[in-house]
Amino acid sequence: MHLILTCEHGGNQVPRSYRVCFTHAQPILVTHRGYDIGALSLARALALHFEAPLHSSKVTRLLIELNRSLHHRNLFSEFTVGLATETKQQIINTFYLPYRTQVEQAIRETGGPQRPVLHVSVHTFTPQLNEQVRVADVGLLYSPQRTREAVFCKRWQSAMREAVPNWTVRRNYPYRGSSDGFTTYLRTQFSPDLYLGLELEVNQKHAANARFWRSTVARGIAASLETALRIHS
Protein backbone atom coordinates (compact mmCIF):
# COMPACT_ATOMS: atom_id res chain seq x y z
CA MET A 1 0.00 0.00 0.00
CA HIS A 2 1.33 3.42 -0.97
CA LEU A 3 1.12 6.06 1.77
CA ILE A 4 0.41 9.71 1.03
CA LEU A 5 0.17 12.31 3.79
CA THR A 6 -1.54 15.68 3.68
CA CYS A 7 -1.96 18.55 6.12
CA GLU A 8 -4.58 21.06 5.03
CA HIS A 9 -4.34 23.27 8.12
CA GLY A 10 -0.61 23.38 8.71
CA GLY A 11 -0.20 27.08 9.42
CA ASN A 12 -1.84 30.44 10.04
CA GLN A 13 -0.05 32.52 7.44
CA VAL A 14 -1.95 35.34 5.75
CA PRO A 15 -0.77 36.17 2.22
CA ARG A 16 0.30 39.79 1.86
CA SER A 17 -2.48 40.62 -0.62
CA TYR A 18 -5.16 39.73 1.94
CA ARG A 19 -3.70 41.04 5.18
CA VAL A 20 -6.13 43.95 5.20
CA CYS A 21 -8.91 41.40 5.80
CA PHE A 22 -7.20 40.24 9.00
CA THR A 23 -6.20 43.56 10.57
CA HIS A 24 -7.84 42.70 13.90
CA ALA A 25 -7.72 38.92 13.61
CA GLN A 26 -4.39 38.13 15.28
CA PRO A 27 -5.96 36.81 18.53
CA ILE A 28 -8.00 34.36 16.46
CA LEU A 29 -5.25 33.39 14.01
CA VAL A 30 -3.14 31.90 16.81
CA THR A 31 -5.98 29.66 18.03
CA HIS A 32 -7.40 26.41 16.68
CA ARG A 33 -9.58 28.47 14.37
CA GLY A 34 -6.54 29.80 12.55
CA TYR A 35 -4.81 26.45 12.06
CA ASP A 36 -4.43 22.94 13.45
CA ILE A 37 -1.90 23.39 16.24
CA GLY A 38 0.86 20.79 16.02
CA ALA A 39 -0.52 19.12 12.88
CA LEU A 40 2.27 20.08 10.49
CA SER A 41 5.10 18.96 12.78
CA LEU A 42 3.30 15.64 13.29
CA ALA A 43 2.74 15.22 9.55
CA ARG A 44 6.41 15.94 8.88
CA ALA A 45 7.48 13.39 11.48
CA LEU A 46 5.28 10.74 9.87
CA ALA A 47 6.53 11.61 6.39
CA LEU A 48 10.12 11.28 7.60
CA HIS A 49 9.44 7.98 9.37
CA PHE A 50 7.76 6.37 6.37
CA GLU A 51 9.70 8.25 3.68
CA ALA A 52 6.30 9.19 2.33
CA PRO A 53 5.27 12.24 0.29
CA LEU A 54 3.65 15.07 2.24
CA HIS A 55 1.43 17.76 0.75
CA SER A 56 0.76 20.63 3.14
CA SER A 57 -0.49 24.18 3.35
CA LYS A 58 0.64 26.90 5.76
CA VAL A 59 -2.03 29.39 4.69
CA THR A 60 -4.63 29.98 7.38
CA ARG A 61 -7.91 28.15 6.99
CA LEU A 62 -9.59 31.51 7.66
CA LEU A 63 -8.59 32.69 4.19
CA ILE A 64 -10.14 29.63 2.53
CA GLU A 65 -10.97 26.23 3.97
CA LEU A 66 -9.05 23.61 1.97
CA ASN A 67 -10.92 20.80 3.72
CA ARG A 68 -14.34 21.90 2.47
CA SER A 69 -16.10 21.60 -0.87
CA LEU A 70 -16.53 24.66 -3.04
CA HIS A 71 -20.25 24.69 -2.27
CA HIS A 72 -19.80 24.50 1.51
CA ARG A 73 -21.10 27.47 3.49
CA ASN A 74 -17.89 27.63 5.53
CA LEU A 75 -15.52 27.68 2.56
CA PHE A 76 -14.81 31.32 3.41
CA SER A 77 -14.63 32.61 6.99
CA GLU A 78 -16.18 35.74 8.41
CA PHE A 79 -13.00 37.57 7.39
CA THR A 80 -13.29 36.74 3.69
CA VAL A 81 -16.93 35.85 3.03
CA GLY A 82 -17.72 39.48 2.22
CA LEU A 83 -15.07 39.81 -0.49
CA ALA A 84 -16.07 40.44 -4.08
CA THR A 85 -16.88 37.39 -6.19
CA GLU A 86 -13.85 38.05 -8.39
CA THR A 87 -11.55 38.19 -5.36
CA LYS A 88 -12.95 34.95 -3.97
CA GLN A 89 -12.40 33.26 -7.30
CA GLN A 90 -8.82 34.51 -7.30
CA ILE A 91 -8.30 32.93 -3.86
CA ILE A 92 -9.80 29.68 -5.12
CA ASN A 93 -7.56 29.68 -8.20
CA THR A 94 -4.41 30.58 -6.25
CA PHE A 95 -4.67 28.50 -3.09
CA TYR A 96 -7.54 26.01 -3.19
CA LEU A 97 -7.48 24.41 -6.61
CA PRO A 98 -3.67 24.01 -6.93
CA TYR A 99 -3.42 22.27 -3.57
CA ARG A 100 -6.26 19.85 -4.11
CA THR A 101 -5.33 19.17 -7.73
CA GLN A 102 -1.76 18.37 -6.72
CA VAL A 103 -2.89 15.79 -4.17
CA GLU A 104 -5.42 14.25 -6.54
CA GLN A 105 -2.80 13.99 -9.28
CA ALA A 106 -0.34 12.34 -6.88
CA ILE A 107 -2.94 9.69 -6.07
CA ARG A 108 -3.63 9.05 -9.75
CA GLU A 109 0.07 8.67 -10.51
CA THR A 110 0.94 6.33 -7.62
CA GLY A 111 -2.17 4.22 -7.06
CA GLY A 112 -3.00 1.01 -8.86
CA PRO A 113 -4.91 -2.28 -8.55
CA GLN A 114 -1.94 -4.01 -6.94
CA ARG A 115 -0.94 -1.13 -4.71
CA PRO A 116 -3.78 1.11 -3.51
CA VAL A 117 -3.15 4.50 -1.93
CA LEU A 118 -3.62 5.07 1.77
CA HIS A 119 -4.20 8.78 2.19
CA VAL A 120 -3.83 10.04 5.77
CA SER A 121 -4.95 13.62 6.25
CA VAL A 122 -3.33 14.90 9.46
CA HIS A 123 -5.35 17.17 11.74
CA THR A 124 -5.60 18.19 15.39
CA PHE A 125 -8.64 19.25 17.39
CA THR A 126 -9.21 21.61 20.28
CA PRO A 127 -9.75 19.85 23.66
CA GLN A 128 -12.98 21.79 24.20
CA LEU A 129 -15.33 23.27 21.64
CA ASN A 130 -17.85 25.68 23.11
CA GLU A 131 -19.15 23.79 26.16
CA GLN A 132 -18.23 20.32 24.94
CA VAL A 133 -15.10 18.60 26.26
CA ARG A 134 -13.68 16.15 23.72
CA VAL A 135 -13.10 12.81 25.46
CA ALA A 136 -10.41 11.32 23.23
CA ASP A 137 -6.70 11.58 22.61
CA VAL A 138 -6.93 10.46 19.00
CA GLY A 139 -9.72 10.13 16.48
CA LEU A 140 -9.59 8.08 13.28
CA LEU A 141 -12.10 9.18 10.65
CA TYR A 142 -13.26 6.97 7.80
CA SER A 143 -16.30 6.16 5.67
CA PRO A 144 -18.45 3.35 7.12
CA GLN A 145 -19.57 2.59 3.57
CA ARG A 146 -16.01 1.66 2.58
CA THR A 147 -15.21 -1.72 4.07
CA ARG A 148 -11.45 -1.49 3.56
CA GLU A 149 -11.29 1.86 5.34
CA ALA A 150 -13.34 0.51 8.24
CA VAL A 151 -11.17 -2.60 8.59
CA PHE A 152 -7.95 -0.61 8.41
CA CYS A 153 -9.16 1.90 11.02
CA LYS A 154 -10.04 -0.89 13.44
CA ARG A 155 -6.57 -2.37 13.03
CA TRP A 156 -4.92 1.02 13.47
CA GLN A 157 -7.02 1.72 16.54
CA SER A 158 -6.00 -1.60 18.11
CA ALA A 159 -2.34 -1.04 17.27
CA MET A 160 -2.43 2.47 18.71
CA ARG A 161 -4.00 1.27 21.95
CA GLU A 162 -1.13 -1.18 22.30
CA ALA A 163 1.53 1.39 21.42
CA VAL A 164 0.18 3.97 23.88
CA PRO A 165 -2.06 2.04 26.33
CA ASN A 166 -3.27 5.07 28.27
CA TRP A 167 -4.70 6.79 25.19
CA THR A 168 -8.38 6.93 24.35
CA VAL A 169 -8.57 6.21 20.63
CA ARG A 170 -11.97 6.53 18.99
CA ARG A 171 -13.25 6.02 15.47
CA ASN A 172 -15.22 8.75 13.67
CA TYR A 173 -14.72 11.14 16.56
CA PRO A 174 -14.82 14.07 17.19
CA TYR A 175 -16.17 14.31 13.63
CA ARG A 176 -17.70 11.86 11.19
CA GLY A 177 -15.51 10.59 8.41
CA SER A 178 -18.42 10.84 5.97
CA SER A 179 -18.89 14.59 6.55
CA ASP A 180 -17.86 17.08 3.89
CA GLY A 181 -14.09 17.10 3.52
CA PHE A 182 -11.18 16.47 1.19
CA THR A 183 -11.21 12.70 1.72
CA THR A 184 -14.97 12.68 1.11
CA TYR A 185 -14.42 14.36 -2.25
CA LEU A 186 -11.56 12.04 -3.19
CA ARG A 187 -13.76 9.01 -2.56
CA THR A 188 -15.95 10.24 -5.41
CA GLN A 189 -12.92 10.23 -7.70
CA PHE A 190 -11.38 6.87 -6.81
CA SER A 191 -12.80 3.40 -6.24
CA PRO A 192 -12.49 1.65 -2.84
CA ASP A 193 -9.95 -0.72 -4.39
CA LEU A 194 -7.64 2.14 -5.34
CA TYR A 195 -8.09 4.65 -2.52
CA LEU A 196 -8.42 4.60 1.26
CA GLY A 197 -8.96 8.07 2.72
CA LEU A 198 -8.53 8.53 6.46
CA GLU A 199 -8.34 11.57 8.70
CA LEU A 200 -6.08 11.45 11.73
CA GLU A 201 -7.30 13.77 14.50
CA VAL A 202 -5.07 14.32 17.56
CA ASN A 203 -6.06 16.25 20.67
CA GLN A 204 -4.23 19.57 20.83
CA LYS A 205 -3.82 19.27 24.59
CA HIS A 206 -0.76 17.11 23.88
CA ALA A 207 0.83 19.75 21.64
CA ALA A 208 1.55 22.04 24.59
CA ASN A 209 4.51 19.82 25.53
CA ALA A 210 6.81 19.86 22.50
CA ARG A 211 8.98 17.00 23.75
CA PHE A 212 5.96 14.81 24.46
CA TRP A 213 4.52 15.70 21.05
CA ARG A 214 7.73 14.65 19.26
CA SER A 215 8.33 11.52 21.29
CA THR A 216 5.20 9.86 22.62
CA VAL A 217 2.65 11.27 20.17
CA ALA A 218 4.63 11.12 16.92
CA ARG A 219 6.36 7.84 17.74
CA GLY A 220 3.21 6.17 19.04
CA ILE A 221 1.23 7.11 15.96
CA ALA A 222 4.05 6.11 13.61
CA ALA A 223 4.59 2.76 15.33
CA SER A 224 0.88 1.93 15.33
CA LEU A 225 0.46 2.94 11.68
CA GLU A 226 3.44 0.79 10.78
CA THR A 227 1.83 -2.18 12.55
CA ALA A 228 -1.52 -1.60 10.84
CA LEU A 229 0.15 -1.39 7.44
CA ARG A 230 2.06 -4.61 8.05
CA ILE A 231 -1.08 -6.48 9.12
CA HIS A 232 -3.11 -5.05 6.25
CA SER A 233 -0.57 -6.11 3.65
Image (cartoon, rainbow, N blue to C red):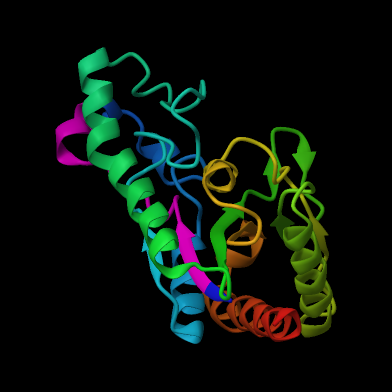
Residue drawn at point x = 79 percent, y = 57 percent: 147
Q: Which quarter of the rendering shows the N terminus?
A: bottom right
Magenta part of the chain: 3-20
- Look at the image and say whether residue 16 sits in the magenta stretch: yes
Q: Quadrant of residue 76?
A: top left
Image coordinates of residue 15 in percent, x first then y, are 21, 41
Q: Between residues 35 and 29, which one lies in front from this camera angle?
A: 35
Left or right: 58, with 65 as reference point: left
Count all numbered tags in the image, as a single digit: 0
Residue drawn at point x = 78 percent, y = 80 percent: 164
Q: In which quarter of the image is residue 138?
A: bottom right
Q: State whether residue 79 appears in this view.
A: yes
Q: In this view, does 49 lie above or below 178?
A: below
Image coordinates of residue 32 in percent, x first then y, are 52, 45
Q: Between residues 120 and 202, which one lies in front from this camera angle?
A: 120
- Look at the image and say whether residue 6 sits in the magenta stretch: yes
User: Residue extending furthest front?
Assistant: 113
Image coordinates of residue 75 in percent, x first then y, are 45, 28
Residue drawn at point x = 52 percent, y = 73 percent: 3
Left or right: 39, with 133 as reference point: left
Image coordinates of residue 227 in percent, x first then y, are 72, 85
Q: Is residue 155 above or below residue 196?
A: below
Q: Which quarter of the rendering shows the C terminus?
A: bottom right
Left or right: 188, with 205 as reference point: left
Residue drawn at point x = 21 percent, y = 33 percent: 19
Q: State whether residue 13 appears in this view.
A: no
Q: In which quarter of the image is residue 91?
A: top left
